[in-house]
Image (cartoon, rainbow, N blue to C red):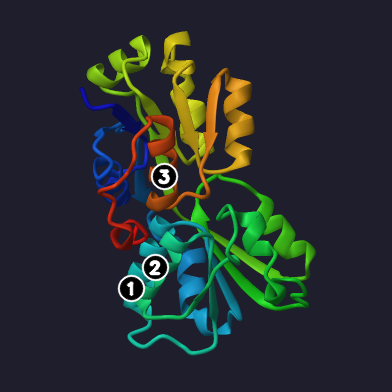
Amino acid sequence: MRPRVLITRPGSRAMPLVRAIEALGAEVKPLEIMRQEPLVETQAMRNAWLDFDQFSKVVVVSPFAADCLAESLDRYWPQLPVGPHFYAVGRATAETLHERLAVRVRVPPPGPEDTSEALLSLPSLQALDEQKVLLVAGEGGRALLAETLETRGARLTRLALYRRVLTPPDETSARMLSRGDFTALVVSSGEILDHLAGWCTQAALNQPLIVSSQRLATLAGSLGFADLRVAQGATPNALAATVAEACDLDGADIDHDDLDKG
């Protein structure tokens, strides 16, 4: 039988990861336990869009945040101003910004992980003396980016454009988690990992868990997961490579040109 791999990436963003893991010869089961919903536009959002040309830097934390930003800017700016410089946490976010807005995007330097810490290492984000910076994210999440940018002197505007809604797994998924009836589990969000742990019995906790950063591995260990595998980032390519190792698959059929697109 083919190994069964559970993934937790929400919405349409899951499809490149599904294709990447299926190319290994595994069966993929997406766990629909989170959805992302755009928030109703507020006066603070309208103010930011009207004054968008005054921002020197725009930092975007996720592909869905990039989609929400593009939708808003399309309504206010038929032609984007040339002033703002765009930054993204991760290649998937950068690709979304480039596709939707046709802008050049700065990303963390090549390294083992696409993280906020990596983005903050860029030289152009070190000294922000009174520069107006827009941080585009969802509700909640880590405060590291906002706090660090302000500490470095930015006049920061943080906008939450969407919210994440956690839901229980469906009956089939809950049964798999209860029985440990899968070969590997892939998680690249701390919020999802914390939520998912409530449905994992010891059988599930003992199965291989693939995470996208050492920070998530630390969280997973505190939640009781016993077999931790840290991928070289959150891209489909990186996650699929670690799935191949965990499930003892050779990955001979992987199309690497396709994997990096998600």
Specify the amino acid type for callout 1.
Glu
The residue beneath circle 1 is 99
Q: Nearer the viewer, residue 29 or 79?
A: 29
Q: Nearer the viewer, residue 117 or 112?
A: 112
Q: Secondary structure at mark 2?
A: helix
CA gap between label 3 and label 2 equals: 21 Å
Residue 61 lies, in percent from the top left, at: 51, 58
Residue 74 lies, in percent from the top left, at: 33, 76
Camera-nearest label, 1 or 3: 3
CA gap between label 1 and label 3 equals: 26 Å
Q: Is residue 215 left or right of residue 65?
A: right
Q: Quadrant of the C terminus?
A: bottom left
Q: Secondary structure at mark 3?
A: helix
Marks 2/1 in contact by CB < 8 Å: the verdict is: yes
Residue 234 lies, in percent from the top left, at: 47, 49
Residue 95: which disc?
Answer: 2
Q: Nearer the viewer, residue 252 or 201?
A: 252
Specify the amino acid type for callout 2.
Glu
Q: Residue at x 31, y 63 (%)?
A: 257
Q: Can see residue 15?
A: yes
The residue beneath circle 3 is 241
> Which of the two discs, 1 and 3, labels the residue nearer the N terminus?
1
